[in-house]
Amino acid sequence: MDKISVLSSKRHALLLRLLKKEGVNIPETKIPDRRKDAKALPLSYAQQRLWFLNQLEPDNSFYNIPAAVRLTGRLSASALEQALSEIVRRHEVLRTTFPVVNGQPFQVITPHCPFRLPVVDLTALPETDREAQARRILSMEARRPFDLSSGPLFRAGILRLAEQDHILHLNVHHIVFDGKSIGIFFREFEILYAAFSVGKASPLPELPVQYADYALWQRDWLQGPLLERQLYYWKQRLADAPPVLDLTTDYQRPQMPSYRGALKTFHLSPELCESVRALSRGERATTFMTLLAAWVLLLSFYTEQEDIVLGTDIAGRNRAEFEELIGFFANQLVLRTDLSGNPSFCELLNRVRVMTLGAYAHQDLPFEHLVKELKPKRELGRSPLFQIKFMLEDEPAAPLALAGLGQKPVTVETGAAKFDVLLTIFSWQRTLYGSLEYNTDLFEAGHITRIVEEFRLMLSYVVKNPEATLHTFKEKLGDARKRQFKEKAAQLKASRDLRHKHVGLIRAVRTEE
């Protein structure tokens, strides 16, 4: 699934207060129901961008969002199917398609009909073969493309491995779903399954607005002086920005990108996690800002650039009416950091804090508007404005709590990479862990492993010596590389010496014979 930043209502309110202290006020507005007056339902700006990208590669699975959970215990298949059906009924966006009329796509909401959950029974296979076959099916389902014009854009199924062992798998197109939607979906699923499994009605209230209301509202709201202010900020902010972050790759960039990708996961130690949070508190920064500053510093070391441009996602749910809606609200922000002048890490962190707050305050400009306005030079296989992305998933969805069932998430990879590199840090129960998604057309796995190791190392340096200058940190990282090179050289020499010793012994034995 596409890994993106989300803010709860409480954290969003905290952000608004922080922005207000910085002199930035963001007005709250109500969302009226406009659909009854609309002759046609347009796409939101985010949906429009994905629809356009889909036209370029119509049979791709880049924007599939797969998920799976293993359920052990006595499963009520009827309650499961009923819960999924009710979610699809409640959220119109999950039964929306995007046909084209006179060259323009529109949202068409299909009438609700009961959702049927297909079951694939693997119990006829030998027990040792069931796991492998389940993995093959999950991988195949994750990569199966969607047809945006005819749908459906939400799929689900059950794999039956034993009488009390099942895997529920989902796949949704990003055009109707985002990171925050994952939490909403499973929270409602948990409540509905609990009710339906004992014969009760749904306890969930009807939704006051739907995603189509948001799409109409967004187009009415984002115009005039508001749009001009947003555009002015980003034009000033990104003036003369470097078009490319020159990160050394292992392979030459192909003329026709395949978007094949892989994932490297890692954890940060509890001590390092606490040190990162302590430094953030002391510098009036968020954990996101501190991690971003360390990542930017590492990229500056790799590229020898002092003007670093990255991308990130922001939830885009800055109105209370959107909090409980499934849909594609997320927007991409461009984060440009100035590392010139050899500042201390504390000074760099302050620059990142100011830059990030400014970006948050102007988050409503759709990314596609920005690209259209700035007209960056387009190159096949390179995303415009930035090629490397950083995200913090601050509140991943809590584990399911289905009555009478044990649950365990199942990792499902799409095997795709939409960017050169995407670093995602997950924050959960005081721990920090991460994943580095990378384009396998460009990077070898060993290269990515070294980046992960050096990111950990850079973090440990900056939290221990935040007043040290950037040049100092780069020297430390260079020294660490030299030590590592010497250690590997010594290991290779020892291995060669041992091999030569064995060869000598063999020759001596043969001579004796």
Image (cartoon, rainbow, N blue to C red):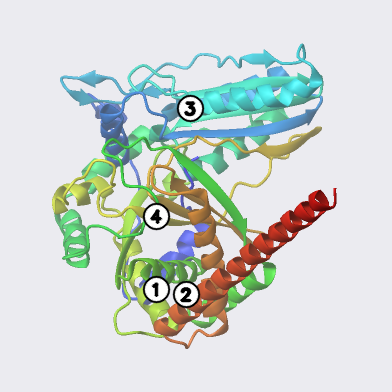
Instruction: Locate residue 13, reporting x and y percent.
Output: 46, 62
Within-10-Å neighbours for mark 1: few <14, some 14–19, many 20+: many
- What's under tag 2, amino acid-wise? Ala
> Which residue corresponds to mark 2?
285
* Residue 246 higher or lower than 297, as above or below: above
Instruction: Locate residue 278, reporting x and y percent.
Output: 59, 78
Of labels 4 and 1, the one closer to you: 4
Within-10-Å neighbours for mark 2: few <14, some 14–19, many 20+: some
Compute the Cα span from label 4 to label 1: 17 Å
> Which residue corresponds to mark 3?
143
In this view, the residue farthest toward the top is 124
Figure label count: 4
> Which residue corresponds to mark 4?
389
Compute the Cα span from label 3 to label 1: 38 Å
Mark number displayed over residue 410: none
Within-10-Å neighbours for mark 3: few <14, some 14–19, many 20+: many
Pick whichever of labels 4 and 3 is earlier in the sequence.
3
Is label 4 in contact with label 2 (beta carbons under 8 Å)?
no
Compute the Cα span from label 4 to label 3: 22 Å
User: Under tag 3, what secondary structure?
Assistant: helix
The reply to whether residue 37 is in sight is yes
| Location of residue 115 by image quarter | top right
* Residue 38 higher or lower than 314, as above or below: above
